[in-house]
Image (tube, rainbow, N blue to C red):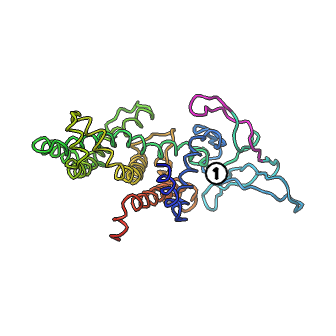
């Protein structure tokens, strides 16, 4: 078993592009797990005087042209009557040196360990907005970490609900066959015929306005899982139809094993290769669904962060032209989805060599 695992890992990491995708995904999940540590500010921190502040400039050379410790300046916001826009001028009267592993705002590591140590920050009243600020003066860089906690975990949470249902449902349908199979598949096809995204929009629109973001997040996860298991169960059912007449299945039945035990312990494990591939390729779809809902204002609500609702501000062309840092969440969504697809495609080639031969 260990030899097989080593061969699998070796083949998975042989391609440098796929290896880069794995490193990117691993890094993303490390960052969101320790979001409070890596983020200079909390997701609720705001400075309304610095609405749409550009990214802080980091200086490593002082006025005398000498190399020095990195520092930054605060911005002063001034209205420009010629352009009718707010200009942000560095206030060079006070330097704020960057500090690492410094004390800052309180947060809870893993949700329950209190801490106030941040990877990077500056002393008050300095502001360190590495990727600028949004309309409410909130640090975009910090909110990217907290937004990733929603956008990158919703896919796995939905999988933990939909895949066990689809796996067991398809296994029972294929094993018993006949009228049971026909009835169960008609129900699965009815679920599949529901337009998933429009269902999510409709349900999200009628949710009570006083729902918390945690409740809304749980609701979206359950709905995504509910509409995602049917297609998966059909494929599993087809695989079970081709497996149930194998000798090991007949041997299990001959020794008196129950139908459920035969399905769970002998038939469904034979579908493991497909399940692994399907899970890897399904996560990007869930990420895009949540991001799309939040972008439309029907998912995670402000002031809680997700990459989708953070990207909503970038729908205005003025923000795209003059505040390109607001597009950063969209770039991260693209990178995450692309990385998952690259890894999933490679896993499919490894576990099913026929797929490579068909190309």
Instruction: Decide: is 234 above or below 259.
Output: below
142 to 318, vertically: above or below: above
Q: Secondary structure at mark 1?
A: loop
Residue 41 screen position, x and y as percent: 64, 40
Q: What residue is rendered at 68% in x and 54% in y?
A: 88
Q: Residue furthest left?
A: 179
Residue 198 magenta: no
Q: Decide which of 286, 52 is in the foreground and name it.
A: 286
Q: Quadrant of residue 137?
A: top right
Counting other residues with Cα less than 10 Å from the Cα at mark 1, is it few (<14), some (14-19), or many (20 or more)? Answer: many
Q: Is residue 102 magenta?
A: yes
Q: Is residue 72 left or right of residue 31?
A: right
Tell whether 140 sits left or right of 266.
right
State the residue position of label 1. 53
Q: Nearer the viewer, residue 334 or 70?
A: 334
Residue 291 shows in this picture: yes
Report the predominant secondary structure element of the magenta stretch: strand
Magenta residues (range): 98-115
Rendered position, 95 above or below 349: above
Question: Does 196 sit above or below residue 358?
Answer: above
Q: Nearer the viewer, residue 152 or 120?
A: 152
């Amino acid at each position: 078993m260990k030899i097989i695992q080593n061969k699998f890992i070796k083949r998975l990491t042989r391609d440098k592009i796929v290896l880069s995708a794995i490193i990117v995904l691993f890094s993303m999940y490390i960052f969101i797990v320790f979001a409070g540590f890596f983020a200079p500010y909390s997701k609720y921190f705001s400075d309304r005087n610095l609405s749409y502040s550009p990214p802080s400039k980091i200086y490593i050379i002082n006025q005398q042209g000498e190399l020095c410790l990195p520092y930054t300046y605060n911005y002063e916001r001034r209205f420009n009557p010629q352009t009718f826009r707010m200009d942000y001028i560095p206030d060079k009267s006070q330097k704020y040196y960057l500090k690492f592993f410094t004390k800052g705002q309180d947060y809870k590591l893993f949700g329950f360990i209190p801490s106030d140590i941040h990877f990077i920050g500056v002393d008050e009243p300095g502001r360190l907005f590495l990727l600028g600020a949004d309309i409410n003066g909130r640090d975009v860089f910090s909110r990217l970490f907290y937004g990733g906690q929603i956008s990158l975990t919703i896919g796995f949470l939905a999988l933990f609900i939909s895949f066990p249902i689809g796996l067991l449902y398809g296994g029972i349908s294929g094993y018993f066959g006949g009228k049971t199979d026909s009835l169960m598949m008609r129900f699965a096809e009815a679920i599949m015929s529901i337009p998933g995204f429009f269902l999510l929009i409709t349900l999200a629109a009628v949710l009570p306005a006083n729902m918390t973001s945690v409740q809304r997040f749980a609701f979206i996860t359950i709905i995504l899982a509910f509409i995602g298991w049917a297609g998966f169960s059909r494929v599993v059912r087809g695989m079970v139809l081709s497996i149930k007449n194998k000798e090991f299945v007949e041997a299990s039945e001959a020794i008196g094993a129950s139908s459920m035990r035969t399905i769970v312990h002998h038939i469904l494990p034979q579908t493991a290769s497909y399940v692994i591939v399907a899970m890897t390729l399904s996560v990007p779809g869930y990420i895009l669904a949540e991001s799309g809902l939040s972008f439309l204002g029907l998912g995670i609500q402000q002031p809680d962060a997700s990459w989708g609702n953070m990207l909503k501000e970038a729908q205005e062309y003025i923000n795209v032209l003059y505040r390109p840092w607001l597009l950063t969440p969209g770039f991260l969504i693209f990178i995450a989805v692309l990385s998952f697809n690259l890894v999933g495609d490679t896993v499919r080639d490894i576990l099913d060599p026929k797929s490579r031969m068909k190309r």
